[in-house]
Image (spheres, rainbow, N blue to C red):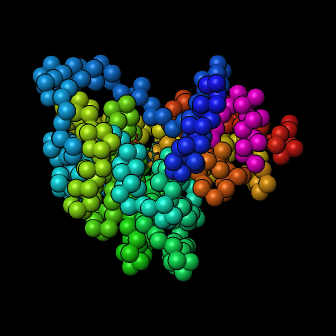
Amino acid sequence: MTMTAELSHVARMADRAAGFQPSPVRAVFDVSMQPGMISLAGGNPYLAALPMEKIAAMVGDVVAARGLDALQYGSGAGTEELAELICRVMELEGISASPENVQITAGSQMGLELVTKLFCNPGDVVIAEGPTYVGALGVFEGFQAEVAHVAMDEDGVVPETLQATISALKAAGKTIKFFYTIPNFNNPSGISLSLERRQQVVDICRAEGVAIVEDNPYGLLSFDGDLKPALHTLDPDNVFYLGSFSKIFAPGLRTGWVVAPKEVRGRLQIASEATTICPSVLSQMVVEQYITGFDWRGQIDTFSAVYAARCHATLAALAEHMPEGTHWTTPTGGFFTWVTLPEGCDTDQVLAVAIEAGVVFVPGSAFYADGGGRNQLRIAFSYAPADQLAEGVKRLAEAIKAALGQAS
Ligand code: PMP
């Protein structure tokens, strides 16, 4: 009886729900929890690097001193104080924005959802790097937007390919709404867009009338201190910028933001109010305390040093254990490296063997909307300690060798 009712509910769902899939990252979450399993899958920040007692005191102070506001509904745009501070944070990447261009959201995931909701009709095209963030693909799917990927090399998206893709889509009569890009320490590839290409990409999009959505949660987590100017600095009127405190502070606060020209920001607020009424005032006030009363830039250095050491351990283990014909990226920041196996080696199949061997990762096909990435995989080095990363890579290499028929 219950079964029949459930089936008919599914049949009645809107077209936009047809493509809803569990996230491939969350799908391996339960497996990651098995005893003895090493996870190279989830890109969780290493929160143990935060001084929890100080953070606890900060939260307590906010409630004690400002509880009547912190626990109340607030402005749909977010607090003015935090919008001001966000502008200061963004100055580190050269952005000069004013608080009235800032819409605060429950994480940058929500920012992307709002932008897509505002711009995409079913059948519109979003251009994205190949590979791209799996959570972004989920958003585009939810609004029935089509995704056209543009290939990257070690310097990021290739401008000529971007141009050719735009031209081909237009020739096919498609409506392109925006180019979604993660220019710094891309999730999942770890690749950053070179300085020279930033201007080219911005110029192409401006000339073609395609907006840019710049998703930048990892930009400040540079291993060598090199911070490239945000695309937003090059064309503020055509770039919608997504920022987040998830990686430079803590994802549990669910606090991110969108920077957009005034007429877009106003509509984002209306869309945001329809979803959450207002971003959590408590979270915003805790973030305000964090930025004004704590050495947050020192904390970014602490986080970056942890991730740099873990990245180093991962790359060393890859060099030691991976079979011939395997390649990987060399990130200079962020959480991820991207591994390409010999042609024909299917990482969905490798995953089953790897889980048996006690290691889990996310197969490359998760990061493409078009079935690409089959011989690729993502390794997250942000969460597991260096010795576990090394052991995990060793187990992974054995699983790959088994798939290639080279088991030792
Ligand atoms: N964009 C990218 C590229 C990400 O990697 C993530 C988180 N993994 C997000 C957006 C969402 O982050 P937030 O916690 O700010 O919603």
> Residue 293 at what x, y percent from top left?
18, 32
Left or right of 184? Residue 360 is right
- Which contiguous range is marked in magenta? 346-362
The answer to which image quadrant residue 153 occupies is: bottom right
Q: Residue at point 78% right, 50% down? A: 345
181, above or below 175, in the image: above
Specify the quarter for ligand 1: top left
Report which quarter residue 301 is drawn in. top left
Q: Quadrant of the C terminus?
A: top right
Whether residue 134 is in magenta: the answer is no
Tell me if I can see residue 314 in this picture: no
* Residue 163 drawn above or below residue 366: below
Question: How many numbered dots are placed on residues in this image?
Answer: 0
Q: Is residue 360 magenta?
A: yes
Identify the residue shown where x is 51% and y is 73%.
174
The residue under the point 54% across, 51% down is: 15
Q: Which residue corresponds to the image point at 37% horizontal and 30% vertical from the top-left?
A: 252
Q: Residue 311 at x, y = what percent?
A: 54, 41
Determine the image quadrant of residue 397.
top right
